[in-house]
């Protein structure tokens, strides 16, 4: 099965080159779609400096957020499997094979890489971030009836037919919640696998803060109560009527 890695990037000149070189090394990765969210630093130069037929690059005309970058990356993707990889160094591309394994073995349609399922190598950082992540996953599970341990993880992999046309309408970091709310209504087999996590401090470039956590709570309520009535989302979910329940 061919694999497209979707890489949204904003002001990641220091790390994106390392990430791309690691992804290029992976024999199972057939396409790397990099969408530059109108970075103000040297992110574009860092991407263009790497020569590889695997890389497809696009730059948004204005800074529009991670959701917009992933929407564009999905449009450009050609693989049988789509997986999201952030452009920082918090998630190790060498673990992608483990994330994709349940889909490759045809026992899963969607896979999340969990930082909490079975603790692997993980940098010790902010206790309140840990609590916030656990709370958001718990709150989301109440509505989706899934037993996810880490809905905010970057690593989300999908069989293409379940993600390429999935509506993504949120802003900022609400995409993780929106995706999970939609997956919870789909007749798909969802797996989690343990991953390592090399978190950054704010001084090192971490972007998520308390405001994003508050928005995530609001997005959980919106997409699980009101957003499910969205006509575009209803049309997408209707495609899977008649499939076996997860």
Image: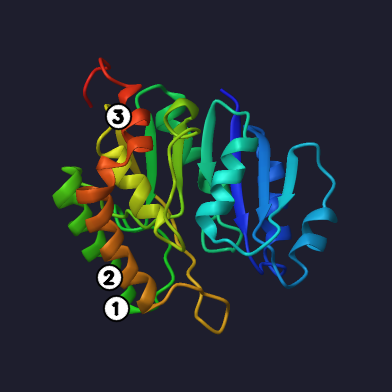
Numbered badge on residue 144 = none
Residue sitting farthest toward the top: 242
Question: Mark 2 touching mark 1, by CB under 8 A?
Answer: yes
Q: Residues within 10 Å of mark 1 (few under 14, many from 20)?
A: few
Determine the residue positioned at 29% across, 52% down.
Answer: 117
Q: Earlier in the sequence, mark 3 or mark 2?
A: 2
Determine the residue positioned at 32% across, 46% down.
Answer: 180
- Image location of residue 228, percent across then percent down: 26, 42
Numbered badge on residue 128 = 1
- Measure the C-alpha gap from mark 2 to mark 1: 6 Å
Q: With respect to residue 98, does 86 lie above or below?
A: below
- Image location of residue 96, percent across then percent down: 52, 43
Q: Residues within 10 Å of mark 3 (few under 14, many from 20)?
A: some
- The residue that disc 2 covers is 132
Circle 2: element type:
helix
- Measure the C-alpha gap from mark 1 to mark 3: 31 Å
Q: Is residue 154 left or right of residue 182?
A: right
- Image location of residue 232, percent across then percent down: 38, 36
Q: Is residue 148 left or right of residue 165?
A: left
Q: Quadrant of the C terminus?
A: top left
Circle 3: element type:
loop
Residue sitting farthest toward the bottom: 203
Question: Mark 3 touching mark 2, by CB under 8 A?
Answer: no
- The residue that disc 3 covers is 189
- Image location of residue 2, percent across then percent down: 60, 26
The residue lying toward the viewer, choosing from 161 and 165, is: 165
């Amino acid at each position: 099965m061919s694999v497209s890695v979707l890489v949204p990037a904003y002001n990641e000149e220091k790390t994106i080159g390392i990430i791309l070189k690691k992804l290029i090394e992976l024999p199972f990765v057939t396409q790397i779609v990099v969408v530059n969210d109108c970075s103000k630093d040297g992110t574009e130069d860092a991407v263009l400096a790497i020569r590889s037929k695997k890389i497809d690059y696009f730059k948004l005309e204005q800074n529009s957020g991670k959701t917009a970058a992933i929407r564009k990356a999905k449009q450009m993707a050609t693989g049988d499997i789509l997986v999201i990889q952030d452009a920082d160094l918090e998630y190790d591309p060498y673990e992608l094979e483990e994330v994709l394994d349940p889909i490759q073995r045809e026992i899963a349609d969607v896979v999340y890489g969990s930082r909490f399922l079975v603790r692997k190598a993980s940098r010790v950082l902010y206790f309140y971030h840990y609590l916030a992540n656990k709370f958001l996953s718990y709150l989301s599970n109440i509505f989706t009836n899934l037993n996810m341990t880490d809905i905010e993880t970057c690593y989300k992999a999908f069989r293409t037919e379940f993600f390429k046309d999935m509506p993504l309408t949120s802003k900022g970091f609400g995409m993780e919640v929106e995706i999970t709310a939609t997956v919870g209504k789909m007749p798909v087999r969802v797996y989690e696998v343990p991953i390592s996590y090399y978190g950054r401090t704010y001084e090192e470039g971490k972007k998520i803060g308390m405001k994003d956590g508050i928005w995530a709570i609001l997005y959980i309520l919106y997409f699980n109560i009101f957003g499910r009535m969205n006509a575009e989302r209803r049309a997408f979910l209707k495609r899977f009527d008649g499939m076996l329940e997860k």
